Amino acid sequence: MAEYRAYVTDAPGGNVEYRSVQISDENGNVMLKPLLTGICGTDRGIARGALPFAYNPSGYNFLVVGHESMCKVIESKSDYFKPGDIVVPIVRRPGDCPNCLIGRPDNCSDGNKHEAGITGLHGFMREMFMEQDFNLIKIKDKELGDLGVLTEPMKNVVKAFEVIERVSTRSIYQNNLSTMEGKTALIVGTGCEAFLYSFLSVDYGFDTFISNRHPIGQTSLNMCKQFGVNFIDSSKEPDFPQKPLDLLIDTSGDPGTVLRYLRKMNYNGIVILFGTNGKAPSTELTGEDIDHIVERNITIAGSVDAAKIHYMKALDYLSKWNRMHGDIMKTIITAYFSPGETDVFTKKPDGEIKSVIKWQ
Amino acid sequence: MAEYRAYVTDAPGGNVEYRSVQISDENGNVMLKPLLTGICGTDRGIARGALPFAYNPSGYNFLVVGHESMCKVIESKSDYFKPGDIVVPIVRRPGDCPNCLIGRPDNCSDGNKHEAGITGLHGFMREMFMEQDFNLIKIKDKELGDLGVLTEPMKNVVKAFEVIERVSTRSIYQNNLSTMEGKTALIVGTGCEAFLYSFLSVDYGFDTFISNRHPIGQTSLNMCKQFGVNFIDSSKEPDFPQKPLDLLIDTSGDPGTVLRYLRKMNYNGIVILFGTNGKAPSTELTGEDIDHIVERNITIAGSVDAAKIHYMKALDYLSKWNRMHGDIMKTIITAYFSPGETDVFTKKPDGEIKSVIKWQ
Amino acid sequence: MAEYRAYVTDAPGGNVEYRSVQISDENGNVMLKPLLTGICGTDRGIARGALPFAYNPSGYNFLVVGHESMCKVIESKSDYFKPGDIVVPIVRRPGDCPNCLIGRPDNCSDGNKHEAGITGLHGFMREMFMEQDFNLIKIKDKELGDLGVLTEPMKNVVKAFEVIERVSTRSIYQNNLSTMEGKTALIVGTGCEAFLYSFLSVDYGFDTFISNRHPIGQTSLNMCKQFGVNFIDSSKEPDFPQKPLDLLIDTSGDPGTVLRYLRKMNYNGIVILFGTNGKAPSTELTGEDIDHIVERNITIAGSVDAAKIHYMKALDYLSKWNRMHGDIMKTIITAYFSPGETDVFTKKPDGEIKSVIKWQ
Amino acid sequence: MAEYRAYVTDAPGGNVEYRSVQISDENGNVMLKPLLTGICGTDRGIARGALPFAYNPSGYNFLVVGHESMCKVIESKSDYFKPGDIVVPIVRRPGDCPNCLIGRPDNCSDGNKHEAGITGLHGFMREMFMEQDFNLIKIKDKELGDLGVLTEPMKNVVKAFEVIERVSTRSIYQNNLSTMEGKTALIVGTGCEAFLYSFLSVDYGFDTFISNRHPIGQTSLNMCKQFGVNFIDSSKEPDFPQKPLDLLIDTSGDPGTVLRYLRKMNYNGIVILFGTNGKAPSTELTGEDIDHIVERNITIAGSVDAAKIHYMKALDYLSKWNRMHGDIMKTIITAYFSPGETDVFTKKPDGEIKSVIKWQ
């Protein structure tokens, strides 16, 4: 029976506090301590009791929160990991559907998976925990530094682009030179995930835009400039885009914004829905919207979570971008907090792209 | 300069009349006379001026309508066709985008294709016309009879299932036995296309339902029974479906109906939007709808038209179903009209599944 | 402990006899009696002790042979099956690799699967046996008759064409009209599998040839004619093919024949290796052969066995062909034997396409 | 009519000399001078007259050789390129088959493409030449330096892995965690292409081996060590591999070596044939080899050339590896020659990985 301090909630009731907990039944051959844990909209949703699907692990009246993390190996009975190794633990754990059985719980067919820090499994915001080695990704790039904590959000981006590659096989999506040159992508939102989506979009060769309905800070603008992403303040550019969009990725979950740009999609266009916001105001879906989707062979795909392969590729992309644009890339972490601070769960710091808790 | 009688409109103004026309610039090495031409929602949309995208061929102040047809070869300079052969002409003709260049104008990337009887190309409701041999599909099955006129609507169904096959590669869509057993499909609508969709859905192994918001006639019910399709009167079965849908195919174009069932989609569910009805009443798209699409990895795909390969496979399916359930299958053609009759363009006959004009 | 008569061997020693056996540990909720069981090269290989990979089930010093069968349900505790139903049992049973876990033991990643009548699992040539319902395919088409016994060989053909569809996605394989018109396929061999391959090849739209190095009988020639397949006696037509092959399917397992035609493959050509004959004479593989494969982006794919979905589609194709060409199709079964006769395991009857044992 | 010095041959007769040539009909909106041009087996094959498929451009009695190059823009009428830009020109130019029409001349369906420096199109080993902007890839990474000349060989590697991704969809190729961990790849050969293949193999997550039948130099061994590739001297390790291979990539074109390792392929294994050597000694292909391919669902795919998208991704990989292992990576260029030197076309320098001609 281990006792340590952790950020906990009684899911799905809301409220997050930092206190001592006892957790007794941890399976795992690797002991970990977190170095950094990131805070995202899901954590804040749990904190304000807005995620009815969250629940405590069986046998517990609390849930340790936190699913974005970068940890250090303290002890290891696994041949593959040594004390001192830096790792990222996987969030979602498989059930027994066909997708789970092949290592794709992100595509779980029946909902019988668990997610650390969210649904029935303790998360990573605690002084220490045990894990099975196969649930850990080793960070081999020593230069990556704190950016390793972005592996978890980045893995979602990698999976979404896998979805794009698969659904795009329904027609020839590339231009007549086999590339994406001349194709336009818009990423809606300017949070951490949105930026990661926009960077990968540039890598794929899209003319890439990122939008919000208000201006963004200088750090964000610098990042856009460095990576070749164009920022659109949609409140001031009602006519954007001038030419049809080939790819739309929404991180806002806002129906009105999604439909606004869905109406600008090109033939064979692909829309990725990633952001969720159940409380967002509704909007009108018209017969003409459906016409547009049909006549243009448009594909709209929800995309959630990702699998181990995507964590590994996420690290690859982060390393690459860090080596190319390290100074700017590092500014994506906009605030560091200490264990025990809880305000960050209820209040978004000004100019936040990514807030993290620094454990050591 | 050939002169013959034809059903014509001045697109997109509406009204269809049967009169003599002169058409001078027909390219083609095969001379055809229609045997049967089918009437669908698009024809009626043109007739009531509701399709703003319809337009006359260049150099003409009229458009011959009609895109569903089964024709007889009268003369042929093509080695592949002989007088007396029964053929179906392709509707959509390629532009020069990558998809058009590989024989997939159904997936046209820029809209620079043409459609016989709809957009800039004379259709098939005329006493005779010329065609290029590569635009013709030969009907080899002598037993198919009048059902050959369903090739054009059926080809859309075949293409949509190709889309399903492609987008479903984003995860394991089948059950753990590699089949569709235990998977549920709902086809919205009870017109000819809806029935064809439902038959193919049964062939794929789905538990298949077809729905409308009112009762359907005995002919339709018989057809359902014969093919193993279950009819749902949605006005009386508000709780349908009891278990989540794995496949939803909409032929209504009605936003309210689409969202009603979208909310019942299973994990990895696929929604095909096929029907269009720009004038349909709007409905509310909520934040929770978007959540549902995201969290369940749902894919929504518009699907329009089809390519030559789909016409060929369409004939294959029609032949198969005719051989299995010929007596019932033939009742899908619910009314025959004669050249010159125009009421059918403005008034849907009672109990219509498919109305056709019989030319000879 | 059930006792009944069966065709048994002591694998892999060779020899097949018909005698009483006791089998005690059958799991299954459906009791079956065979109506027809087919004999193929694998059965004869077992009979002459030429298949070193064959082995007895655990705890038995014998193996009931037979994997091609059509059976009648005698008793059933399964809701899905009723006494009198006609079914085909699946041959290969899953291990625990990723492919097996999703119902694709045909693609088993580690060899830990079993095959009824071949590797560690009793086969179907016995007076009765028990089966789990999920291992059975129901034959719904009452008109199919004895041709149902071809489901097992046909399922291999369906899977191989799935392989063709998958590997062909590496380039555009179709012509510029999206079809296979103008593409040439050669099936090497004139046994039952070869004919089934050739029929499906015609269905896919290939100009289809079937070859052997000697003449074939009138029954076979009639079948070719009916289905639109062209027979080539390769001993007399050294220059065949005149134009490059787009698809080559080998059912012979003969290296010399495979290479002879591999050298005639077109750009993006696909070669399916299906036949096996370990004792076939070797042939020279040259540097120029490898050049040819590389420079033309040729794909060579071994294909073995099939999954439940393929059994179901196999029945679909057999039904279709039976309805189209029933009289000729039925001649594919060239000889019927009675339980107890064993010569057919060691001697191929003259003009054999498919020999079967008729149990009732 | 431009006159400049160039490396020329009279294809396919053999011999390469450096002399003045006049070339009059160059289409292009960008004027280029080479910085570096690489020499590969194809160039040497042309020089010794061993490539019968090489031919002079129409209207010329000579062919400028050279297809691996990195060039500087001297003048530009294209908006996208400015003087001083560093670019790589594409080698293969499209015909009019479906693959060529969508920008995939690497998959040309009929052989009617051209290749600069090889088949009917002047190559890049000349003081200057004109190009169309759409045939040029811009090198944006200023740190890449001389390694940009590897873009052309690397693009072949990227395409081959695309082939692997496509053909592997015929089954689940990954392990039950969705990754390649525990999978083994062998690359046959230790030339420049072989190393590039091995680096990408490591990136994909394979345990990666590279083999030759003799020892390799210290530079090569250092590179292996740095990238995590294991070298096998096949003359000394007859029992390699201990466990079956999941991926085999041959850069040797040697039938004996290909078959040696083909016999060690795992279930669902993939073999990429890339190397060509028409003069290599033949080997015996046995019936058991074919059995092995069939029973294990093995796929063998020839892969030649690549498309524009692969050049772009090639640059991405080179940049990444240069940033990670720049010091070692740069040693892959083992020798620099000056314009006018011709011995390198006939004699491979000791310890060569990649030899280049430095033009400026």
Image: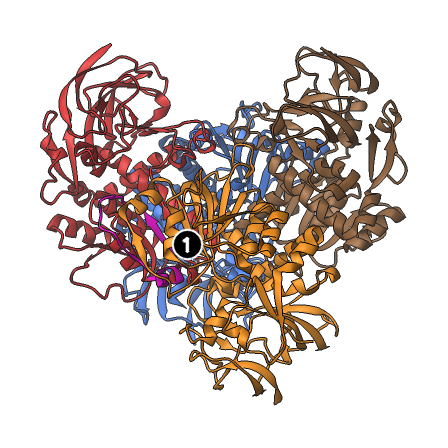
Chain colours: A brown, B blue, C red, D orange
Q: Chain of mark 1?
A: B
* Residue C48 belongs to magenta span: no
| Location of residue A281 with respect to A114 vertically, above or below | below
Residue behind mark 1: B309
Kindly identify the residue that appears in the image at 61 percent across and 64 percent down: D334
Residue extent of the magenta highlight: C265-291
Which image quadrant is residue A155 in? top right
- The location of residue D53, given as percent across then percent down, is 41, 73
Kindly identify the residue that appears in the image at 28 percent across and 65 percent down: B83
From the viewer's perspective, tell me whether residue A250 is left or right of residue C322: right
| Location of residue A122 with respect to C150 vertically, above or below | above
Image quadrant containing the C terminus of chain D: bottom right
Residue B23 visible, this orientation: no
Which image quadrant is residue C191 in? top left
Instruction: Identify the secondary structure beneath mark 1.
Output: helix
- The location of residue C139, given as percent across then percent down, is 29, 30
Question: How packed is label 1: few (under 14 Cα within 10 Å), some, or many (20 or more)?
Answer: many
- The location of residue B98, given as percent across then percent down, is 54, 62
Farthest-out residue, bottom? D1
Image quadrant containing the N terminus of chain D: bottom right
* Residue C275 belongs to magenta span: yes
Residue C27 visible, this orientation: yes
From the viewer's perspective, tell me whether residue C322 is left or right of residue B245: left
Q: Please name whichever residue, B274 or C124, is drawn nearer the observer in this view of the structure.
A: C124
Mark 1: amino acid: Ile
| Location of residue C61 with respect to B51 vertically, above or below | above
Q: Please name whichever residue, A160 or B297, is drawn nearer the observer in this view of the structure.
A: A160
Q: Please name whichever residue, C103 or C225, is drawn nearer the observer in this view of the structure.
A: C103
From the viewer's perspective, tell me whether residue C347 is left or right of residue C199: left
